[in-house]
Structure formats: structure tokens, C-alpha cells
Amino acid sequence: MLEALEGSQAIARAVALCRPDVVAAYPITPQTHIVEALSRLVAQGDMKTEFVSVESEFSAASVVLGAAAAGTRAYTATASQGVLLMAEVLFNIAGLRVPLVMTVANRAVSAPLSIWNDHSDSMAVRDSGWIQLHCADNQEAVDTTIQAFRITQETELPVMVCMDGFVLTHTFEPIDLPTQDAIDGWLPPLEFSRKLDPGDPKSLGTLVSPDFFAEVRHSHHAAMTKALSVIGEVDEAWSALTGRSCGGLLEVSGDPAARIGILAMGSTCGTIQTGMEHAAGEVGSARLIKLRAFRPFPADALRAACEGLDHLIVIDRAISPGLGGVVGTEVAATLADVPGAPRIHNHALGLGGRDIPETIYADLMATVTDPDSPAFSVFDADMEKLDPEDR
Amino acid sequence: MSTEGQDAARLAELRQKFGREPLPPREGEAEQSPRDAQPRFRGLESGHRACQGCGEALAARLVMECAGPDVMIANATGCLEVFTTAWPQSAWRVPWVHSLFENAAAVASGMEAAMKAKGRNTKVLAFGGDGGTYDIGFQALSGMLERYHNVLYVCFDNEAYMNTGIQRSSSTPHAATTTTSPAGKERMGKRHLKKDLLSIIAAHHIPFAASASVAYAADLQRKVRYAMGVDGPTFLVVHSPCPLGWRHASAMTIEVARRAVECGLFPLVEIERGAVTNVMPIRDVRPVTDYLSLQGRFAHLMKDADSRAAEERAHLQALADYNIEVFGLRGDSPDAADTTGTAVVGRSGRPAGRI
Ligand SMILES: Cc1ncc(C[n+]2csc(CCOP(=O)(O)OP(=O)(O)O)c2C)c(N)n1
Ligand code: SF4
Ligand SMILES: [Mg+2]
């Protein structure tokens, strides 16, 4: 049954359906509505969980780490500065390979202070060893959240579900929430293989000498690579349950015959899609690639998705100053050894909440034919606002 | 998933395997001595890599003996973590997790929440050094106490960051030298005071907070047993000499720890819901120099030629006198529970003082 729900409310309800044993979170815009909604569900008795109202994101991450290590299902959510404050724990959670789920309501990182959306926060912890999935709309965010609980159990890797702050978290949309029975049947009980248990004592997080460290990292990388197929399988199993797919690792849409492709993550995909529907007549149509799994990075699927393209526009919602776009750079590296690979046009867009209008589609398409178009740009930066020496 | 019954059987088996066999009663002894009646659980095994005479290793073993097998531990980064676990070995006989330097209290909070969610009463312990407790993990600890998690937090206080090579912490005593508070022409060791952490803990009005010392094993274990029985947050700071960092002979660990208590610099107190409810009286108060002179970290205070040395000694004596005054530590008459009585072990092996 469809319900009109704010993105954050929908996420809270989806989390409740997964019956986490322990939830710990600290408020930060634009994630706040999620913590508040969860608190209300607990207060009303609609959700049975140990809700730990911590004194910081650092403790939120540490609490769910402890809860997961003790063998229970755990959940947290944060954004922006919260992600950065958690950073040390996030690497630790992944290194310990404990299963848990976290929502990131993507927001820019200070300074300058901005509460608005971009992907700087989750990008900053891209190498932490978490699975990172990006959601294009609120239904996908709900579906991905529930899928994440199953992925984390099957892989024993933590899963970060990224959804654009405000654009998704604060937007009302008709949402189909599965029934409790459906989820109870679909999501098996958590059995963490290395859980802390007085009946079978283990030491977790020991000191590791150089004799073993490389092997630990290799096995983490191997586990992430194996997770590629799990992400796909879980999405298929979800589709069998609900009839909806989130696209697995990535989803290709638009004009399959087009020689120009546009790749994006998150809600930008919808804007591009609509822009194309309006402007295809004037500027031509494109193949759209929605990258859902950013970590593990789906290199093979990406190569297949780009076959036959002459140009690929890659949209980044964050910037690595001194390099350019992270997604763009990774896509270029992935396609580097493909004969006849498309030329990459990498643009950072919508930083710090700058509105991305539908007309962006036509503007982006125009860069492809512009011989002076740079390999990377902050596409919507208005040079008129800058001193000449800063341009 | 194992049932409670199976768990109990497994725990009994572990207790049998790793606990010491209770001794048969001695001839002519009607009841078992309390020590024999309490089979010792070896939660922390020997064979780890601590330095000889490490106070922290001893303190942790004493804590584990009374904590028993039905516990799980969150351990902060520090010497205890490093010397007990070097993959693929571990000295722990209980479930144990090390996450980071500053989050042991928060990880323990999560473990306790997990036990609550599962309806189990496995007690969660959090272990940290003074750095992980007084300094970098302080916020997480305060949060854990405020949220009233059923966790026993034990701080092994060796008064510096030992694991990284003896740097000052906010628990380092005034005038002690460390590698980041060296003595020199301009400095007489640490310029600031040792943080009065116990008072800050007391301000959280938790059910039980206490200081203890490795020199007084029976007293330390009594406090652990008491805290284990409390359903709520409890805190124990255990004075744990570090021969390497304090620069005293390895064989002197207990003597050094005892003198810290006997001179009043490390008072042993118990605090319940914010109020001091018990202290260990000092039978024969010693001058602080008896304590300082055993340790290289205070060697610069023992130089007669340096006038600043006498000044700092007087300063430390004043701090000790202040403790004795505010906690009423001077024993009026010999008492089985005072610093001398508690340390005496009766001929039966029974501690002469309280247990
Ligand atoms: C965030 C962070 N900063 C610094 C360190 C380095 N470090 C590891 S242990 C330690 C000192 C530990 O001191 P303490 O807590 O007193 O324990 P001890 O080794 O003395 O028992 C430091 C500074 C770290 N691990 N993490
Ligand atoms: S340095 Fe000190 S605390 Fe660390 S193991 Fe050695 S004696 Fe123990
Ligand atoms: Mg220390």
C-alpha cells in the first residue's frame, strides 16, 4: 500500500521493519528527522529496540560497533560532520568486519559551513572498507535500507546507505512499505560468526604484526569483491519479494543506442532523466548510468555499461581539491584499458546544495561537442562571483 | 543459537578448566578459608608480554579473578591491550574486543545494550589506561555513566601514556617527569596537577565508584565483587605502578603502590551516589619522600642542591596532607581494615582484614 511519507520517516519505518536490537544515533541536519522518527517509534511502542541516545557521533558509531560485536543487529545514521567525527570508528568497524547498517544523509563538509547536500561526507570515508550504496529516490532508499541489513549479514561487512540530504530526506513521496510479515520472512535472524560470547570466548581487534597485516587487508579486499555478487543477488531476491529492483550494482537506462552517456549517483539521476525527457528533441538523447554501488566498485559492470559510447559525462557531487572528481577519476581508471573507451568529461555539480536544474542536461550535453571543454570542472561555479585571480 | 542452559553448562566447564581447583579443607579446619572457597578464575592468562613487575598486568589479573567467566570486555588501546594480544595469540579467556583508544566506554555501552536486547545478564566490563580514561576517552565515559549502562569501567592508572613510551597524561602527578614533561633548567617535570577524576565521576551520582591499589589485593577484589553485583554503572580506578615509566625496580611494584597510599597521594575511597561512604584509613602515615625516593620519575626532586626540589617536595606533601584531611584518612587506632591491617595475611591464608 502506498503511503505519502517524508524520506526520513520512511527510512525510520524501514529500519523498524528490520527489527534492529540496538540503535544509537546523534542528531545532525539533515539526518535529524530519522533519529527523531525512530525515537517516536520507540516511545510509542511501535519499535522494540535498545535506543542508545549517545553524546556524540563518535560514541554512536562505537555503540553500534559494540552491539554488533556482541552479535546483535545494530543501526545508526548520520551526515557530514558526524561522518567525519565517526571516521576513526568507521575504519575500525570495517577492519573488525562487524555487520551493521548506517544511513548517511549526504551533506557538505565544513568549512565553509553548509547544511546542504553534496557527497563530500561519504566520499571522505570511501577507503574505510564499508560497502557504500547510493539511492536515487526515496523508494530506493527504503528498499536499499532493508536490503542493506541482509547484505551486511551475508557479507559480514558494514553497509553505508547514502541518500541525498534534504533532496530525499525531507521530500514527501508515495512510498510502498512492505509488511512486517514479509520482512520477517525475507530477512533471516542475524548470526555473526565471530560474536563475543562467554560460552566461546574470542579476542577481537588484537594487535597485528607486519607478518599478518597484508593478509588482513587482502582478505578485506577479497570480501568486498565478493560482495559485488551479493549486492546483485540481494536486489534480485528483493525484486522477487516486492517486484521492485534498485538496479543491483548499477542501472542503465535512457537511449541504448546513444553515443553519449551520463553517469551519476543519487538523486541527480532523476534530474538528469527528467532533463533528458524535456530536451532530447533539441540536444539528443543519452545513455544514463546510475551508479548504485560505489564500494565495492563495479568495474566489470561499468565496462559493460559503457560499451559503444564515444563520450561519457561523469557527474561528481564532491571534489578532491587538486585532483578533481573522485567518481570521474575512478571511472576513467576503470575504462583506461578498454579499446575505444569513451572520452570522459568529469564535472562536479551541486556542491553544498547548489540547485541542479533540469536544464543541466542540455548544458552538459553541450560540453561534449565543445573542443575547449576541460577534462574536469566545477560545472556550475559562476566565475563572475570570484576575484580574477581565483578563477 | 545456544540456550541459557547450554551456556550455563559451557560456563561451568570453562570454570572447571581454567579455574583453580578448590583446595580441600586443612586438617582441623572446620570451614574452608574464604580464599579456598573462592576458586580463582584465570580470565587473564600468564604468558603475555607485559614487563616484569607490571602493575597493570597484576591489577587486570586480580580484577578478572573475581569477575569470572560470564563477562565480556571492551578494552581501550594501551599497554594492557598490546601486551595481552598479539595475533595469533591472546591471553584472554573471556570474550574481549579492542576497538580504539578513546571509545572503550561507548563500545561497552553497545555491548551492554546488546545483552539487554537479548535478555541476558552477562556483565560488560570496560578497561582503559589513564590516558584512555582521564583524557581522550573521558567524554565517552561520561556519556556511559550518564546513560546508566550496566558496565563496570576499570581504569588502570599508571599515570602516563606508557604504551607510546611514557608521555604525560592528565593523571600524571605534579612534578613527575615523563618524555613530554621532562625536568630541566626551566621545568621541574609536569607543571599541572593530577586530575581529580574520582570527584568528576562522583558528580555523575552513579551507584558505586572507588579507587583501589594493586598493593591491596583483597580490598581491590572486594570492590570488584561489589561492583559486579551492582545493576548500573560502576567505576574503579586502580593505581598500577609501571616499573618502566616510573623507573623503579620491578620487584618494588607492590611496595611503591603501598607507599602511594600510605603517604596520602593515592587515597583509597569508595563513593556511592556521589557521597564518600568508605575510606581506607592509614595506620602509619609516611612522608611523601618515602614514596618519591623509590622512583626515577621523581629523582630531580631528591637533589638537595636544587632549591626548586625542596619546593616541589613541599608542594606534593601539601597535596598528600590535603587528601588526608578531606577524606579523614588518618586512622585513630589500629584497625583490621586500615593500610596495615588489610595488608596482613593471616596464617590460614585468610586475609586478616575485611574481604
Ligand atoms: C586517537 C589516538 N591517538 C593516539 C593514539 C596513540 N596511543 C596509543 S596508546 C596511547 C597511550 C595509552 O596510555 P594509557 O591509556 O594511559 O594506557 P597505558 O599504555 O599507560 O596502559 C596512545 C597515546 C591512539 N592509539 N589513538
Ligand atoms: S610499560 Fe609499564 S604498563 Fe606497560 S607493560 Fe611495561 S610495566 Fe606494564
Ligand atoms: Mg597509562
Image (cartoon, helix red, strand yellow):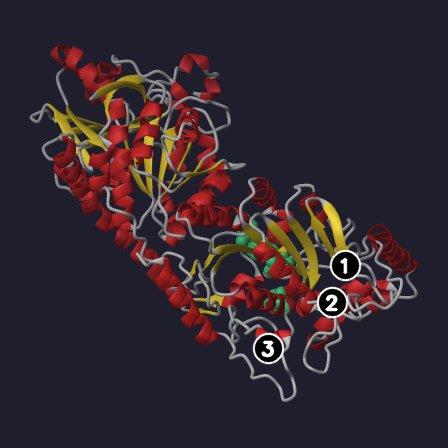
- Residue of label 3: B36
Q: Name the residue under label 1.
A: B266
Mark 2 residue element: helix
- Which residue type does callout 2 highlight? Ala
Mark 2: few/some/many CA within 10 Å (<14, 14-19, 20+)? many
Q: Mark 3 lies on which chain?
A: B
**Relative depth, front residue between A206 and A335:** A206
Among numbered discs 3 and 2, the one appearing first in the sequence: 3
| Label 3 packing within 10 angstroms: few (<14), some (14-19), many (20+) | some
Task: Residue type at mark 3: give it.
Answer: Asp
Secondary structure found at label 3: helix
Residue A266: % across, % down: 28, 27
- The alpha-carbon separation of the residues under discs 1 and 3 comes to 30 Å
Query: Which residue is situated farthest in the bottom direction here?
Result: B27
Please give the residue where the numbered disc 2 appears in the rendered image. B257
For badge 1, the amino acid type reads: Phe
Residue A198 in picture, x, y percent from top left: 42, 62
Disc with the residue nearer the chain's start (1 vs 3)? 3
Cβ atoms under marks 1 and 2 closer than 8 Å: yes
Q: Decide if residue B295 is in sight here.
A: no
Image: A274 above or below A376: above
